Image (cartoon, grey):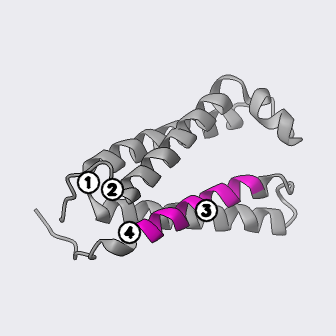
Amino acid sequence: MARLDSIFHPAARSVRLFGLYLIVTGTALLLAPAALLTPLALPVPQDVWVRMAGVLALALGATDVLTAHAGSPLLWRATVWRRAVAGAALLGLVAAGIAPPAVILFAAIDIAAACWTARALRSVKPTPLQHA
């Protein structure tokens, strides 16, 4: 697998910043969901699911930060697909009437961040998967 030594590559920077966004969002959902959801006019669930979503966001955020430092364009590309699919799924939930329109903000952040990383990766030659 090709490795780029610079953690300052634009693709690495975009993955790292999105990871930090997920860490902040996940922490808010875990510790104080009302502080994040109320200003967006989103309902604040009283069950454990919103806090579990926070744990998942924290885990994904930490993984993204580590991925940014790994110097692997293959891993950076994987985050593009994950974020694009997540954003599309959120839009689908809004379109189906399952989620309120404010969720479009989260979808837009996912999709914009995926596009940012994809654009930054244009300068990196794709490499095939290599097995150890």
Q: If the image is split into quadrants, where does the N terminus sit? A: bottom left
Which of 11 and 100 lies nearest the eye of the viewer? 11
Residue that carries the numbered disc 1 in the rendered image: 71
First in sequence: mark 4 or mark 3? 3
Q: Amino acid at mark 1?
A: Gly
Q: What residue did someone put label 2 on?
A: 9
Q: Residue 74, percent across and down?
A: 30, 65
Mark number, residue 112: 3
Element carrying mark 3? helix
Q: Secondary structure at mark 1?
A: loop
Mark 3 vs 1: CB contact within 8 A: no
Name above or below for residue 93 compared with residue 63: below
Q: Residues within 10 Å of mark 2 (few under 14, many from 20)?
A: some
Left or right, 9 with respect to 89, comes to left
Seen in the picture, residue 77 relative to 102 is either above or below; the reply is: below
Tell me the residue that label 4 is attached to.
Answer: 121
Q: Earlier in the sequence, mark 3 or mark 1?
A: 1
Around disc 3, counting alpha carbons within 10 Å, would you say few (fewer than 14), some (14 to 19), or many (20 or more)? Answer: some
Q: Nearer the viewer, mark 2 or mark 3?
A: 2
N-terminal label among 1 and 2: 2
Task: Estimate the spatial distance between the alpha carbons at disc 4 and disc 1, rounded to whole Å.
Answer: 12 Å
At x 74%, y 65%, the residue is: 91
Q: Are marks 1 and 2 in contact (CB under 8 Å)?
A: yes
The answer to whether residue 22 is above or below residue 3 is above
- Residue 106 painted magenta: yes
Q: Residues within 10 Å of mark 1 (few under 14, many from 20)?
A: many
Quarter location, residue 120: bottom left
Q: Is residue 118 visible?
A: yes
